[in-house]
Image (tube, rainbow, N blue to C red):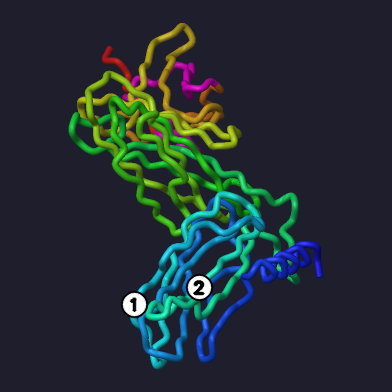
Amino acid sequence: MNRRCVLLAALVASLGLMGWLPLRAAGVTLSYGGLRACYQTGRPIPPFTITAQVATSDTYRITHAVAVNQQPPGTSTIVYEGGISPAQPKVATVTGGHATVSGTYTLIGSLYQLSTGVLVAQTSATVLVADPCPTPPGSPAPPSAAMADIHWSQTATPSQGARVGSLLTVWAKGRNVGQGSGSSDAILAYDPALLRLLDVTPQRDGDWVRSRDDEQGTITLALGSLAPGEASRLPIRFLVLRAAPETVLTLVRADGEDRANPLFLELGQEITGPLRFTMTATAAGSEIRGRGYKPGERLALWTNRQGGPPRAIEGRFAAQADPDGTVAITLPPLGEDVTSVVVAGQTSEVVGLAILPSP
């Protein structure tokens, strides 16, 4: 028996000494169901059940309490109150919620017969809350070198802005570019004087909102485990309150290791299409300048030509490694048939367009 199992056994024994040993009258049982041995810290705990079997038809009350790390249990909550008959056991559902403190959680269920006021049955169950949960015995441990690396990015619909009083949807996306599975949090910041957060709708069961502060204009997004190469998106809806020539939404991974591309939005008018780049002539050729990319990300460039198919511009280009994701690239002289240059972020998926000035 490993040390954790010994500790859990000792804890259960100590709980029994404190009066939490299972209690039941003749023909009466009470039991928890649907529980896992371990839940990850801070992640949603699915609903579980308490089942009561009675010997006499009467009105009963089922309560549930939780004790954390050998501390006294919290206030009991009533999960069911009403009639129960011997022929039909009552299955009551308990909302799981979230466990933000790691450790051992002991669940205490109690069954009272209301006509007599007597506690007729009591049960307990012990679960572990940890990050990560321990690997079950016999399961191969994942290679230590295989780690997740979640890269975040964001785009908007409409792409650059929206009218006052209309909806703006920001899509936050996380993609695992690492070699192992894992999860990630990111913090989205916006100006609450200009945008009102309406809702976030996770697309997967394991994704959720860890916290939000509408006054400060921040929301912490949490993605559940992503396999290597897997991605997940969370749509975030805002109501546009006021017009502004520019506002910036930032999205930063919670551990600070990855900086997502900022969104530069013009509020008061609806803009569709790619980001708009500026293009100026230089002695060496042409310089295109824009922003909205992930700092340091690789870019793909190609030209649109009059009367011909698009043509890739050879070379390896990158957004500058400054916080606003600015890109400034000097290109050699372009052919006379070139009408515009397209710049696509390979991580952020942001697309920009620079239109050549008329001669």
Q: Which residue is drawn at 60% across and 64% down?
A: 106
Relative to 48, say whether 229 is above or below: above
Estimate the x, y position of residue 18 in percent, counting from the top left.
66, 66
Residue 167 seen in render = yes
Q: For the N terminus, which image quadrant? A: bottom right
Amino acid type, callout 1: Gly
The reply to whether the magenta stretch includes residue 256 is no
Relative to 179, say whether 359 is above or below: above
Indicate which disc residue 82 carries: 1
Disc 1 and disc 2 in contact, CB within 8 angstroms:
no
Task: Tell me: 346 left or right of 134.
Answer: left
Task: Tell me: 132 left or right of 227.
Answer: right
Between 127 and 158, the one nearer to me in the picture: 127
Q: Element under label 2? A: strand
Between 264 and 9, the one nearer to me in the picture: 9
The magenta-colored residue range is: 322-350
- Residue, disc 2: 110
Amino acid type, callout 2: Ser
Relative to 148, say whether 21 is above or below: below
Density class for disc 2 (Cα within 10 Å; few <14, some 14-19, many ≥20) is many
Task: Tell me: 11 left or right of 3.
Answer: left
Relative to 339, say whether 38 is above or below: below
